[in-house]
Image (cartoon, grey):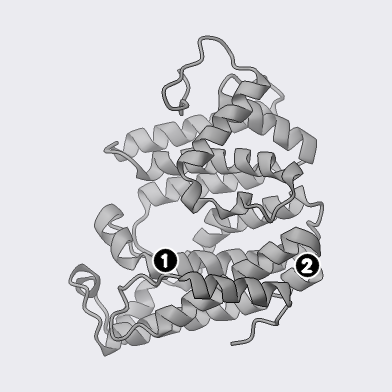
């Protein structure tokens, strides 16, 4: 049995490569609202491999977060994905659709297998770790949960130079921190996770009760402002990547950076409620497109 079957479909025999790709496309389509990397901005030749990478990450993330499974079962499923990656490394033929397509993508684009291992490391950590002592622990998590995605895109574009990889890491880490800030309440209520540095919470006089009761007092606002400034600094540090590269990928990067900065601005203008999730409206999106097209430097 496959670890993650396509909806309303079971393969009686080992699927063909084409069936495997279709499986990944259907899986991505189910979560398309959270899948901007396959947008029309990207070259058509890369949309399919990016969809496969997403299908791998999305299905593994579902093991870590979705449903009513016990922690041991979640880890067992993720270990199964780890074993499938080991099979690819040993050049053994995969049998599951996600890995049939993934093997083809890895081979044709010479992608480092360790980056997929890193993503699995993050998903497993989500199962076993719910609190973070300091920012170093959080940044280390981002190294596994977010940075591999940007690195894989650079490898797909044949732009994975050391300097580009570093800039990409800054952007991806910043985006992960922004997601944490948007989902403080959701992460706590749905998964009992807090992605805020424990030592900084203590320094500002913020307790878990603040999150439990949505207390947005001065202490909480100051704590969040520190996180906003950190995320903004990282995003600006990585922003030159969108100007060093060219073409549609660079345009998409510039839009992502501008979007991240706009979300941070909205988080900052919280109106006394740091738990309110910011939304980008039509005017915001048009502004982001304009700034990306005109290559406006993202200094806010």
Q: Quadrant of the N terminus?
A: top left
Query: Label 1 belongs to which residue?
Result: 180
Q: Position of residue 137 (x, y in %)?
A: 47, 65
Is residue 133 visible in the rendered image? The answer is no
Q: Quadrant of the C terminus?
A: bottom right
Q: Secondary structure at mark 2?
A: helix
Q: Position of residue 151 (x, y in %)?
A: 68, 55
Q: Is residue 37 above or below residue 220?
A: above
Which of marks 2 and 1 precedes in the sequence? 2
Q: Residue at x 57, y 43 (%)?
A: 54
Pointer 1 local density, CA inside 10 Å: few below 14, some 14–19, many at least 20: some
Q: CA distance from mark 1 to mark 2?
A: 26 Å
Query: Label 2 belongs to which residue?
Result: 163
Q: Residue at x 78, y 40 (%)?
A: 110
Pointer 2 local density, CA inside 10 Å: few below 14, some 14–19, many at least 20: few
Q: Is residue 128 above or below residue 134?
A: above
Q: Secondary structure at mark 1?
A: helix
Quadrant of the rendered structure where residue 91 is?
Answer: top right
The residue closer to the viewer here, 237 or 115, is 237
Q: Is residue 122 left or right of residue 217?
A: right
Q: Position of residue 37 (x, y in %)?
A: 61, 53
Q: Is residue 95 left or right of residue 74?
A: right
Q: Residue at x 61, y 32 (%)?
A: 85
The residue most toward the top is 12
Q: Nearer the viewer, mark 1 or mark 2?
A: 1
Q: Position of residue 20 (x, y in %)?
A: 60, 25
Is residue 214 visible in the rendered image? The answer is yes
Q: Is residue 107 left or right of residue 278?
A: right
């Amino acid at each position: 049995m496959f670890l993650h079957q396509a909806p309303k479909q079971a393969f009686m025999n080992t699927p063909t490569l084409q069936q495997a790709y279709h499986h990944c496309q259907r899986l991505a389509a189910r979560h398309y609202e959270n899948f901007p990397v396959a947008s029309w901005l990207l070259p058509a030749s890369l949309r399919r491999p990016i969809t496969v990478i997403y299908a791998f990450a999305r299905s593994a993330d579902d093991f870590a977060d979705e449903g009513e499974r016990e922690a041991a079962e979640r880890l067992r499923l993720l270990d199964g994905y780890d074993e499938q990656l080991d099979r690819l490394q040993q050049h053994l033929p995969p049998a599951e659709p996600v890995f049939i397509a993934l093997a083809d993508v890895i081979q044709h684009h010479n992608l480092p297998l360790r980056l997929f291992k890193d993503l699995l490391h993050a998903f497993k950590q989500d199962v076993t770790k719910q609190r973070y002592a300091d920012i170093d622990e959080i940044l280390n998590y981002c190294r596994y949960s977010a940075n591999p995605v940007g690195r894989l895109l650079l490898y797909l574009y044949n732009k994975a130079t050391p300097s580009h990889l570093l800039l990409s890491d800054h952007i991806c880490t910043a985006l992960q921190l922004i997601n944490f800030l948007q989902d403080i309440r959701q992460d706590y209520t749905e998964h009992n996770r807090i992605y805020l540095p424990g030592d900084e919470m203590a320094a500002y006089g913020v307790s878990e009760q603040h999150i439990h009761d949505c207390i947005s007092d001065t202490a909480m606002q100051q704590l969040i402002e520190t996180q906003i400034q950190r995320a903004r600094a990282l995003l600006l540090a990585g922003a030159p990547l969108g100007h060093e590269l060219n073409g549609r990928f660079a345009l998409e990067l510039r839009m992502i950076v501008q979007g991240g900065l706009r979300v941070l601005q909205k988080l900052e203008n919280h109106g006394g409620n740091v738990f309110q999730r910011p939304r980008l409206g039509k005017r915001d999106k048009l502004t982001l497109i304009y700034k990306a097209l005109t290559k406006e430097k993202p200094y806010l």
